[in-house]
Amino acid sequence: MLFIHQTTCISPQQTFPEKDINLEYLYESSDNKLKARDPGYENIPANQLRKMGKSVRLGMGAALPLIPKDPKGIIIGTANAGMEESIEFMKQIIDHNEGILSPGTFVQSTPNTIASQISLYSGNKGYNITHVHAGMAFENALLDTAMLIKENPLNTYLVGGVDEIGTKNHNIDRLQSWYKKELVSNIHLYEADSPGSIAGEGAAMFLVNGNKTNAMARFKALTTLYSEDEDIVAGRMQWFLDDQLRTGENIDLLLTGENGDDRLLKFFSACESIMDNETTVARFKHMCGEYPTASSFALWIACQVLTNQALPQHMIKKGSIKKEYKNLLIYNNYKGMQHSFMLVSKIS
Amino acid sequence: MSKVFVTGIGMISAIGNTLGENRTSLLQGICGITKTKNLPSRHSGILPFGEIFIDTQTLKEKWKVTDEGVTRTMLLALHASQEAIQDARLSHSQLIANDTALVNATTVGGICLMDEFFRDVNKESNGSPYLSSYEMASVTRYLRSLYKINGIVNTINTACSSSANAIMYGARLIRNGLASRVIAGGVDSLSKFTINGFNSLHLLSTEICTPFDANRKGLNLGEAAAFLILENEEELKGKKLYAELTGYGNSNDAFHPSSLSREGDGPYLAMGGALASAGLDKKEIGFINAHGTGTENNDEVESRAMLRLFGDPPPFSSTKSNTGHTLGASGAIEAAYSILNLTHQEIYAGLHFKQPIPGTGLRPVTTTQRISLQHTMSNSFGFGGNCTSLIFSKA
């Protein structure tokens, strides 16, 4: 589908800037939240930085190192960007009884602010779009980008996933019991025998095109489905592997979005059970927490594993550290309904 | 790449509850913008709006919806998508097939229930039945589960160009072989949130909007939903064809978060990109359904961009003078009107225009007339500089 040439990631772990990446050390959650580690944002003028909501800040911060490559379009997946600003504006409406209001938060309340701010900052007049379909927002952004590359084989694009923990919108998911009631550290996330996960956030950006030369990873294929039935989900995974892997090829690493929610374990068990003993199973949500576009963090991790041929011990659920990682399968699950499989491979 | 045809249309707006009613209103020059008193807002009765005069409870009863968490936005989307699906005669087995996709757009989503949302945001426990209805994807999730869609499902939000991008994304899914048929469109209902937002920017006119008029005073918000059924050329056996979707262009103006650049680079590039993708010369466009919101900034910039690209622009007008600006639905509503122009070989009078903008001198079409048309263009521009143009061609 496409080749990944450069990536950046601002997350709750030490992932930014590139020279300081350290995936072995695990930063701990506090109050059931894994908050992104804000870097210094040296390239964004202070007066602009102050006006930015968190999603825009994370997205801009992650995108800026990739902008000099002059991508022909900006494709962002985000479920919740602007939600915090929306709530701030609602408060103004209510407090002032629909009187004279300041428009700043309203203008920033629309989720396309991340993509449009990146384009405004870099003077990019190319293709620009924002996909907001919850747990499939980043997957649709990737699919869009894959189509763009097929349509324009010589172009390079910037594609990313961004979401934030809003101080208030977090409450809507909490009321629906998507977060744990008891205090759980990310270090012990998978041991908890209870519903819900811990909240997370971050921004991961990818510079992609159709050119294999000097690429860090190959994004081979993507499939998405909607189901509450684990057998249907595992069946899709089997179909996907049969469709994509050639005889003799194997998945070296299955990277899953297991998130400590005991209601969702059945999906991960079903998917793991169709892998053979050759496949190591690893998890990533104790690093980034749960959020709709967490699959963008997983794809960033996959690129790290493929380029460095190394996997931190704390990620491993089953199997062992391998000598070589060629084919990685990412399985993510959002709220037990939206599922995605992404196949990423080493450049041969 | 496969050609993309429009085989079904469904819509509801301030000027009609069906495609047919909308066309009748357009032919009769009906303006659906009124100083309503029904909206739960202080501005109700003072500012004019393009409101749909069917209350939420009546819509629920009409569609036999009993689920408590269903919002007005979901119901308008249900209403319009049902008409589109029936119009294209999609069978149940087609709806649930892996190659049927659903692409929806909205900017308001569940924030049509602003007061409920704000209460839930601040609650310790016992949330309302609407908890899962607030996110942007909620309307699409609702339609997906109703129709049991198994193909690609997406929600797009690029502000006021959202549903033009949804239609473009749907067409590209077909051209790339990722879907054989797509339900694509958008929806927004009037909300205290957007009313106060646009009002805080001084973009709402206290009078009925006058697109492209020298003395225009701003836009009127409206509510609507519209969906197109897009199908690839192999699917067409014996079907009624409204039009072919032949071109699309998407570009960012990269100038300002809430206004367009003086020369209109974004609109110019979007219209030019659509022409290039359709392989058409600018002289071949017979009519433009302009974005034409009635704001000082948009209408002047859009005029300048049309002059820059076309030299002598083709006939154009803005149907926002009939419906108001329906935000996330406007791209799909106006795509549907551009298709009606082609299928019936007619163009509709832009309303409330008196004098051209000094410096551009452009006059929108002000009389409804029969006209020979091969290709029409529909423009949608949004906050954040997100500009998209679509081109439809006679099937």
Image (spheres, helix red, strand yellow):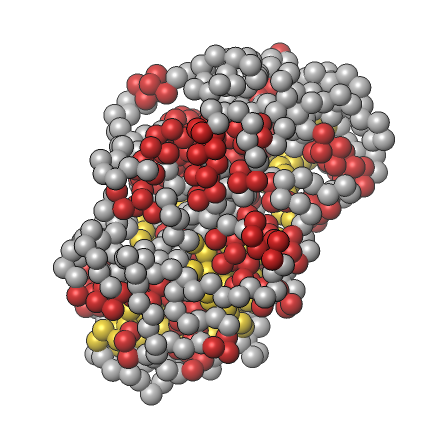
Of B60 and A173, nearer the camera is A173
* Quarter the C terminus of chain B occupies: top right
Of A286 and B273, nearer the camera is A286
Q: Where residue B63 appears, x then y in whole percent? A: 32, 23
Residue depicted at 62% across the width and 37% down the height: B380
Q: Where residue B335 appears, x then y in whole percent? A: 58, 33
Of A161 and B93, nearer the camera is A161
Left or right of B246: which side holds B117?
left
Residue A18's place in the image compared with A48, above or below, is below
Q: Where residue B27 appears, x then y in whole percent? A: 62, 15
Q: Residue furthest bottom?
A: A323
Of A176 and A29, nearer the camera is A29
Q: Is residue A1 visible?
A: no
Residue depicted at 38% across the width and 52% down the height: A165
Residue depicted at 41% across the width and 62% down the height: A36
Image quadrant in which you'd find residue B54: top left
